[in-house]
Every structure is written in structure tokens, then in C-alpha cells.
Image (cartoon, rainbow, N blue to C red):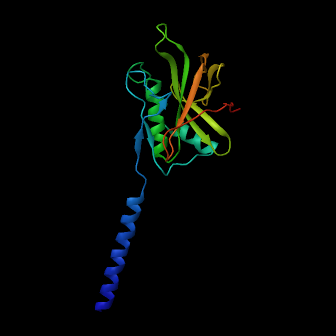
Amino acid sequence: MKITEIIKTINILLLAFVVLSVCASAAQTTFYRPTWEGDKIRNNHGGVLTLAYRSDTYDPTLEEALAFVKMDQTDKHPFEFGEFDCSDFTQNFQHNATSQGLRCGACVMRFHRSADGHDWDGHYINAFCTTDAGLLLIDCTTGDCVAQVEKGEIYTTIPLDQQDTLYTWEAVEDFIITEYHPRPQIEIFHNIFSIQ
């Protein structure tokens, strides 16, 4: 009888050890501030763009990424320049994707310099590197849209839902896609192709 109690106690302790080990190894979310040309990327109201990172995220398939886009509610938030604008939409969407285990970056575009020459007019959107269809850019500021970005071309979004609005800006002068990896910040430049 004593031996069975000892074995029971050992089994309980082993189970507790396994549970604690699994909990301790679960990925923690950390936050980082991406840079472009050595400067932290600023949001539209004077702060710094802050993105989430977890070591257990993965690059989704196109189907998984689009399912997440449709499920995510970031696009439902009202746009308020200087309060909740494209930088906030991008940051929130990226944090939500990361919390769901999907690797998601941000795409920051520059359209032209301001009249005083010190600042850029630009826009922020999100990026997935899908495993089966390549780069997928998402703009959720005017609804759930696939974005087309190419240097020197007009920025355009294609709504996933026909109730959303087709949106065009001006020609993209330059852009960067940020992605966090276990090593320091990496800036990836891509030739963007459109999703048909």
C-alpha cells in the first residue's frame, strides 16, 4: 500500500513537472520597433510603430491568411486621422495576427516628400509571406482589401467584400516590408505581384 502511494505521488509530481515545462516553454510575445534607413518608423501621431513578435509564429497559406483577414475585426474600427489611422490599423492587425500564431509584417509606403521637404506622405498596411502564393499585402483601413504596391505605380486596393470601396492613392515612391526574426531586424524588399 505504501508503494502504490509513493508511485501515485511520483506520477502526480511528474505530471506537474510536464505541465510546468510546457507552460514555461510557451512563446512569450515581445514588442519591437522597426526601422527604415536607421530611424524608427513613426506613426501618424508622433509615436513609434510597435510590432509584436513571438517565436512560434508561422507563415500561413493563402487560405489561412485570408480566413484570418475575414475573421479579424480591426477594419471595423472608425478611421480618425491623428487618433486611429492607418498606422494604428496596421499595428493592431499585426498584433492580432501574431497572437493567433501567424507571422505578419508591416508595409510602410512613401508617396512624396512634404512641402517643407522634411517629412514623407505615406501609408501603412500589413504583409503576409504565404507559403503557397507568396507575398499578400492587406489594407484594412477601408475594409478588408488586398493591396497592390509597386515602386513608381499607383497604390491600389481590391476589396475582398464587394461592399468595401476600391481605393487608389498616388504613385509609390518607395516602400519597405518589415519582418521580425529571432535575429535583429531584417528589412525585406520585394517585387510585389498582385493576387488575381
Residue pictured at 39% horizontal, 69% vertical: 18
Relative to residue 181, is residue 1 drawn left or right? left
Q: Quadrant of the N terminus?
A: bottom left
Relative to residue 114, is residue 59 drawn left or right? right
Counting from the top left corner in percent of width and height, residue 134 is at: 66, 40
| Residue 3, above or below 143 | below
Query: Which of the 4 quarters of the picture holds residue 110?
Result: top right
Decide if residue 144 is in sight here: no
| Residue 115, above or below 166 | above
Counting from the top left corner in percent of width and height, residue 42 is at: 43, 25
Pick out the residue farthest to the right.
196
| Residue 36, above or below 26 | above
Q: Quadrant of the C terminus?
A: top right
Pick out the residue farthest to the top.
115
Residue pictured at 32% horizontal, 90% vertical: 3
Residue pictured at 34% horizontal, 80% vertical: 10
Counting from the top left corner in percent of width and height, residue 108 is at: 53, 27
Counting from the top left corner in percent of width and height, residue 16 is at: 34, 70
Pick out the residue farthest to the bottom.
1
Report the front residue among 85 and 57.
Answer: 57
Decide if residue 72 is in sight here: yes
Report the front residue among 36 and 74.
Answer: 36
| Residue 148, above or below 60 | above
Residue pictured at 39% horizontal, 65% vertical: 21
Report the front residue among 29 and 174.
Answer: 174
Query: Which of the 4 quarters of the picture holds residue 159?
Result: top right
